[in-house]
């Protein structure tokens, strides 16, 4: 078993809020050597590392590999789904270079919802009943005959936006037609999944997986809809908090046993015959619906969530570089970390237009004020998502989810209050955010008394 080196040079792939949170925590590790980030990384992420001059793409493999060798990169941490789906992990892994993030064919658990359904079926993992279609006529016939609420999804990657929850058959037909005809989702929309509509509360369960050992983080709850009270279109995530009390310890154990373990086993079986192939190493992220019939999988992701990671990293106590390295090296059982007993809440401040085309280039202020709002025994960290510096060196918006204002406080009510008050101090033209991150949990605890 390889031991964990005392100093590890890390290349962090990804440019947004999730990566800022990972870099922020990795910077607290004594094992961190050089931290390299992409040249497209947001403004804060660039300040935490050195800029990798190479283009991060499998089509530039020769230069990228040569650069990794030259800079003695010992660990590559891949944040987003796109590079995983393209096979960046397969490309960069080497005898002296661990990669956190699964190889291409196992990343299909996220990048192909049809493949994911098949894995879940084989592993008897509870999920929404679903069928895969590659023809618009067949899909349309199916929803007409079924005539019940359903969910229409592009099978491929769509940044959380290729999903329509349809209460009626005409809505479903319109969603099907949009996916097949619309240019918006391209090839991702030419194969679709139609699922039964699940009802209940959603939660995000993220686990580190090193091929066989599974370490589950405390559950989070994301808020996908753009508007308060869960209204409006889906987004990549408007805010998250951790831990989410709708999944208590007993339920988390049930989810681990009935969902995570069989899925990891099924992923391992994919390459039983080829031991040269790397197993799934990285994060397995289950989007769960807590239905009356128990927890069911809505989707799997093969990576950390955004903004779940901001909420999790705020509570993570341990050496993140070691833990990510161990996950990538298959020695997770030798590492340990704890979670801060306080509650974290991340409120995403978005740019006008999001989740459609966001307005960019607007000056941002108020970050220092927001971070200094924390009281004794509290913390506020503003994680950057879509930010950059303009020619004058000013911090400006460059994406839809501009910053994730993340508070750590003694309970959820206070964490939400603090994060929302701090978010209100972030100023740029057209800024908006949800004040109700965590309200469902707060309401249900009020009902329970
Ligand atoms: P996904 O990209 O698959 O996570 O879907 C985005 C969002 O659509 C989820 O967070 C849910 O709110 C909703 N959704 C997806 N699938 C279902 C389902 N089968 N039943 C109800 N809601 C769903
Ligand atoms: N917040 C959900 C995701 O990262 O997919």
Image (spheres, rainbow, N blue to C red):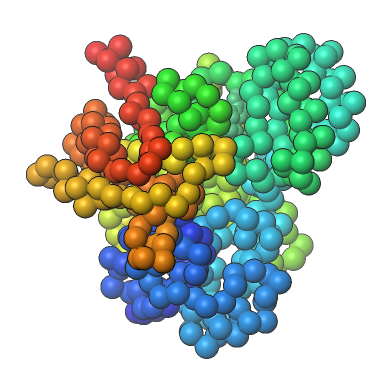
Residue 436 against residue 14 in the figure, above or below: above
Query: Is 446 left or right of 211, judged from the image as shown?
Result: left
Please identify the residue farthest to the front as the structure is shown.
392
Whether residue 309 can be seen here: no
- The residue at 86%/29% (across/down) is 136
- The residue at 79%/14% (across/down) is 146
Residue 336 position, x and y percent, is 34, 58
Name which quarter of the figure residue 407 lies in. Answer: top left
- The residue at 29%/19% (across/down) is 445
Quadrant where the image shows the C terminus: top left
Residue 95 against residue 301 in the figure, above or below: below
Query: Is 73 left or right of 26, judged from the image as shown?
Result: right
Q: Nearer the viewer, residue 367 or 330?
A: 367
Please identify the residue farthest to the bottom as the structure is shown.
70
Residue 248 against residue 103 in the figure, above or below: above
Whether residue 395 can be seen here: yes
Residue 204 position, x and y percent, is 47, 37
Q: Nearer the viewer, residue 152 or 343?
A: 152
Residue 214 position, x and y percent, is 49, 51
- The residue at 33%/50% (across/down) is 364
Residue 95 position, x and y percent, is 58, 80
Residue 249 against residue 36 in the figure, above or below: above
Name which quarter of the figure residue 87 lies in. Answer: bottom right
Query: Is 202 left or right of 7, judged from the image as shown?
Result: right
């Amino acid at each position: 078993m390889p031991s964990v080196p005392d100093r590890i040079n890390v290349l962090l792939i990804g440019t947004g809020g999730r990566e800022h949170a990972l870099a922020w925590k990795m910077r607290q590790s004594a094992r961190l050597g050089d931290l390299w980030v992409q040249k497209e990384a947001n403004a804060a992420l660039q300040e935490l590392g050195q800029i990798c001059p190479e283009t991060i793409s499998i089509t530039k493999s020769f230069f990228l590999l040569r650069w990794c060798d030259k800079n003695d990169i010992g660990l590559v941490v891949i944040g987003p789904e796109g590079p995983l789906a393209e096979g960046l992990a397969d490309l960069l892994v080497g005898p002296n270079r661990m990669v956190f993030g699964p190889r291409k064919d196992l990343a299909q658990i996220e990048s192909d919802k049809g493949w994911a359904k098949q894995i879940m079926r084989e592993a008897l993992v509870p999920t929404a009943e679903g069928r895969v279609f590659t023809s618009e006529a067949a899909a349309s016939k199916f929803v007409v005959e079924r005539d019940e609420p359903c969910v229409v999804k592009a099978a491929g990657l769509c940044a959380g936006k290729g999903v329509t929850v349809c209460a009626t058959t005409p809505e479903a037909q319109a969603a099907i037609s949009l996916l097949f005809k619309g240019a918006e989702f391209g090839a991702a929309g030419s194969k679709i999944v139609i699922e039964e509509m699940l009802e209940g509360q959603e939660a995000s369960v993220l686990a580190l997986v090193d091929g066989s050992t599974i370490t589950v983080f405390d559950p989070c709850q994301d808020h996908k809809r753009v508007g308060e009270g869960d209204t409006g279109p889906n987004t990549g995530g408007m805010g998250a908090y951790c831990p989410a009390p709708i999944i208590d310890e007993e339920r988390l154990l049930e989810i681990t046993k009935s969902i995570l373990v069989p899925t990891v086993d099924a992923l391992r079986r994919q390459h039983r015959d080829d031991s040269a192939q790397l197993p799934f190493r990285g994060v397995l992220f289950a989007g769960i619906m807590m239905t009356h019939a128990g927890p069911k999988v809505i989707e799997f992701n093969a990576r950390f969530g955004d903004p779940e990671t901001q909420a999790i990293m705020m509570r993570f106590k341990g050496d993140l570089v070691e833990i990510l390295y161990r996950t990538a090296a298959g020695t997770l059982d030798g590492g340990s970390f704890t979670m801060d007993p306080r509650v974290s809440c991340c409120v995403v401040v978005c740019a006008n237009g999001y989740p459609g085309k966001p307005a960019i280039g607007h000056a941002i202020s108020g970050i220092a004020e927001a971070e200094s709002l924390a009281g004794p025994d509290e913390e506020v960290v503003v994680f950057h998502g879509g930010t950059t510096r303009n020619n004058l060196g000013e911090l400006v918006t460059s994406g839809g989810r501009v910053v994730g204002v993340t508070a750590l406080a003694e309970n959820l009510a206070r964490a939400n209050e603090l994060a929302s008050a701090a978010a209100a101090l972030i100023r740029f033209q057209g800024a908006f955010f949800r004040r109700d991150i965590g309200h469902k949990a707060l309401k249900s605890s009020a009902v329970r008394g």
